[in-house]
Amino acid sequence: MEGIIAQLGQFVVNLISSFGYFGVFIAMAIESAAIPLPSEIILPFTGYMVFRGDFQLGPATVAATLGNLFGGMIAYYVGVWGGRPFVQKYGRYFFINQKELAMTERLFAKHGEITVFIGRLLPVVRTFISLPAGIARMNPWKMAFYTVLGALPWCLFLIVVGQKMGENWNSLKPLFHRFDLLIGVVIVSGILFLIWKHRRR
């Protein structure tokens, strides 16, 4: 498993180093198109590039968020046009884990469209959430809106983490996936608090 993670990490580093912001876009598109390329590697390395001065924080965050949106919409339309039978039949060719997909479907069925927003901040769920949204034929504009709303704070947070870590961005890589649920809960709580505070005013 560690060897696979190392190979994925090297792929991400090469992709972003070679193609710049477009590499960030492509990597995040892959991650959100139900192909498990960890954003816990993509985004901290992007932050390291900000630290080095090769990237700027704003454009890097936008590239990552748009990549998340693009990949998410691809997975969404796979769900719309192919439905669950297509995913069950061909999903293994795209590294789609049926068990994790089933879990994501249950979450979507239970909590509805808001799951797309929350799911972008949670491990495993964020990779697969677009598929059940497509199978359920969620409004595509709502799908896009909730995807951006959830992806933006996640991307910004981990890019800033990578920027602050600088040369040491890679040292905590094994811990990111363990703590990303906690990170997601913190971000969601902060957003909900701001919404609550705004509505009180």
Image (spheres, rainbow, N blue to C red):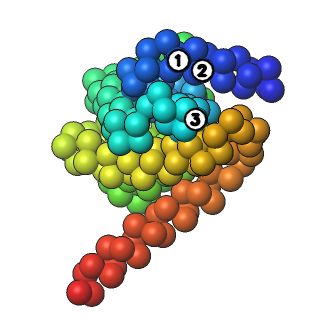
Which secondary structure lies at badge 1? helix
Which secondary structure lies at badge 2? helix
Q: Where 189 sits versus 40, above or below?
A: below
Res. 7 in view: yes
Which secondary structure lies at badge 3? helix
- Nearest to N terminus: mark 3 or mark 2: 2
- Nearest to N terminus: mark 3 or mark 1: 1
> Residue 9 sits in which quadrant?
top right
Q: Nearer the viewer, residue 43 or 118?
A: 43
* Left or right of 155 on screen, residue 114: left
Asked if labels 2 and 1 touch by Cβ distance under 8 angstroms, the answer is yes
Q: Which of 16 and 132 is in front in this view?
A: 16
Res. 46 in view: no
The label number, if any, that marks residue 53 in the structure image? none
Q: Where's residue 96, x and y in %?
A: 55, 25
The label number, if any, that marks residue 13 in the structure image? 2
Q: Nearer the viewer, residue 8 or 169?
A: 169
Q: Where 182 sits versus 100, above or below?
A: below
Instruction: Give the spatial CA distance, label 3 vs label 2.
Output: 11 Å
Q: Name the residue under label 1.
A: 17
Q: Where's residue 145, x and y in %?
A: 25, 48
Q: Where 179 sits versus 38, above or below?
A: below
Residue drawn at 57 percent across, 27 percent down: 37
Residue drawn at 41 percent across, 76 percent down: 193
Looking at the rendered image, the quarter that the N terminus falls into is top right
Amino acid type shown at disc 2: Val
Instruction: Give the spatial CA distance, label 3 vs label 1.
Output: 11 Å
Q: Name the residue under label 3.
A: 48
* Left or right of 153 on screen, residue 51: right
Amino acid type shown at disc 1: Ser
Q: Where's residue 16, x and y in %?
A: 50, 20
